Amino acid sequence: MNLIEVRDYEEMSQIAADYLVKQVRKNPASVLGLATGGTPQKMYELLIADHKKNKTNYNTITTFNLDEYMGLKPTDPTSYRYYMDQNLFNHINVQEKNINLPSGLAANVEEECKKYEVRIQEKGGIDLQILGIGSNGHIGFNEPRTAFSSRTHVVNLTASTREANARFFDSIKEVPTQAITMGIATIMESKEILLLVSGEEKADAMKRLFSQEEPNEQFPASILKNHPHVTIVADKKALKGVVVPV
Ligand code: GLP
């Protein structure tokens, strides 16, 4: 794991946006894995600004989002599809047919999960996956104790994850109890991973990630130690008290 230590959220977002633009310019047919949540929001803002200014072309890219809540329509303001539309897709020239999120409304969820995996394979796999991390070490919505061999699947969200995400809803009662997420194995097949981490509430997760702890399913992000091409962009607050091995 390669670590880039940055000052703050702004610098993390700028580095992440530059990284992504570079990828798209290098390979205009890039398959991007995208994340939601608070962490990548500013990165998306910077991508939109860059698209306006420098005309970075997204016409031939394909996107796969990590996850989606169960039971929310794509037009629901709290769905991840809506988040992506508002924060990125409506402002760049990505083609609708190239946008992929699992559907939380699928009548046959098992089938939907399988189809999502097939679509990723058909596109040749994910070139660059953007990841955030939950304070309990979850990646995507893969909560502690999710099998490392998991592929796209339905998850029951933990109380702590629902609480952490309640800020995007009117009240915690409205936070769905389930989601569909890429599995750990799905994420690990990405050719490259960019993990973005900002803020003190992530410091314990960072301490654990940089500890001697071997990859284990109690702490999902620990699997990233086994990936050959991971870059972590983390700010000072997230790295508070973290001893980075040399
Ligand atoms: C959420 C999302 C993850 C995200 C993580 C951190 O539950 N499903 O994809 O990376 O938790 O969220 P945030 O960036 O808001 O801290």
Image: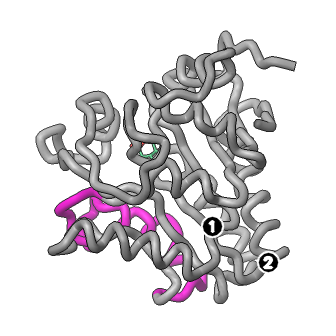
Dot placed on the residue nearer the N-terminal end, 1 or 2: 2
Q: Does ligand 1 reach within 8 Å of label 1's beta carbon?
A: no
Left or right of residue 172: residue 245: right
Name the amino acid, label 2: Asn
Which one is nearer the viewer's eye here, 14 or 202? 202
Q: Residue furthest right?
A: 246
**Label placed on residue 126:** 1
Query: In x, y percent, where is residue 29?
Result: 71, 82
Residue drawn at x 44%, y 25% as measured from the top left: 218
Classify 172 as above or below 244: below
Residue drawn at x 32%, y 35% as measured from the top left: 161
Q: Quadrant of the N terminus?
A: top right
Classify 20 as above or below 177: below
The residue that label 2 is drawn on is 27
Whole-angstrom CA distance, mark 1 to mark 2, is 12 Å
Which one is nearer the viewer's eye here, 56 or 241? 241
Residue drawn at x 59%, y 60% as measured from the top left: 44
Q: Bounds of the magenta span?
A: 69-96
Quadrant in which residue 59 is drawn: bottom right
The secondary structure type at the circle numbered 1 is loop
Name the amino acid, label 1: Ile
Residue drawn at x 77%, y 58% as measured from the top left: 19
Query: In x, y percent, where is residue 68?
Result: 34, 60
Classify 165 as above or below 31: above
